[in-house]
Amino acid sequence: MSRTTKLAAGICSLGLVAVLSASVLAQGPQGSGGPGEQGMRRHGRMGMRWGLEGLPLRGLDLTDAQREQVRGIMSARQADFKAIGERLRTAHEAQRQAVTRVPVDENEIRARVSEASAVEADVAILRARIHEQVYQILTPEQQAKAKTLAAERQKLRVERVEGFKQRRQERQKQ
């Protein structure tokens, strides 16, 4: 297969994954699909971006009360999400501009990278705080199950990375 064909196939695959993901998110984990469910889906995506990926909430059979608590945590942090997201975009844009500026100014690049790193540290702290808050509303059984599911997910990530490395080595040999 030519490189262009492989690229086209990859893009089509990503499109299919995006469509399927959207379909699953639109259906939600269960329920009526009413306004509350829509909010949970929205926060579910934010959760993946902002720190709940270590807590596979869909696999934990949350009660309605726990779902409401998660919604409350995410809603309370909504302003933080927006502010830090804007800071991150601004820092990355400044970094990009410094890198593409001619002539190269190493001190400027180092300063912009340092600023972006500081914002990314703030993102990590926000993620950790949200993770902690959500983890505390789980029962001990749910916490144990969350750890098991997270370990399984990490194992799959490692296997996937190893597979990518093997395929890359095979391509380089050809």
Image: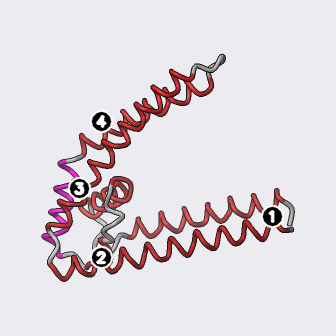
Q: Quadrant of the N terminus?
A: bottom right
Q: Amino acid at mark 1?
A: Gln
**Left or right: where does residue 69 sit relative to residue 126?**
left
Decide which of 163, 47 is in the foreground and name it: 163
* Residue reaching furthest to the top: 103
Decide which of 46, 35 is in the foreground and name it: 46
Q: In terms of sequence position, does the residue under pointer 3 or pointer 2 come before the other?
A: 3
* Type of secondary structure dominating the magenta stretch: helix
- Residue ID at (17%, 72%): 138
Q: Is residue 70 magenta?
A: yes
Q: Which mark is residue 172?
A: 1
- Residue ID at (30%, 42%): 122
Q: Which mark is residue 13?
A: none
Q: In terms of sequence position, does the residue under pointer 1 or pointer 4 come before the other?
A: 4
**Left or right: where does residue 110 sit relative to residue 168?**
left
Binning the other alpha carbons within 10 Å of mark 4 as few (below 14), some (14 to 19) or many (20 upward) gives few
Instruction: Find the distance from the CA under tag 1 to the CA under tag 4.
Output: 44 Å
Q: Which mark is residue 130?
A: 3
Q: Which residue is mark 4?
A: 83
Magenta range is 63-76
82 over 17 or under it: above or below: above
Q: Which residue is mark 2?
A: 147
The percent position of residue 157, horizontal first and vertical second, equals: 50, 71
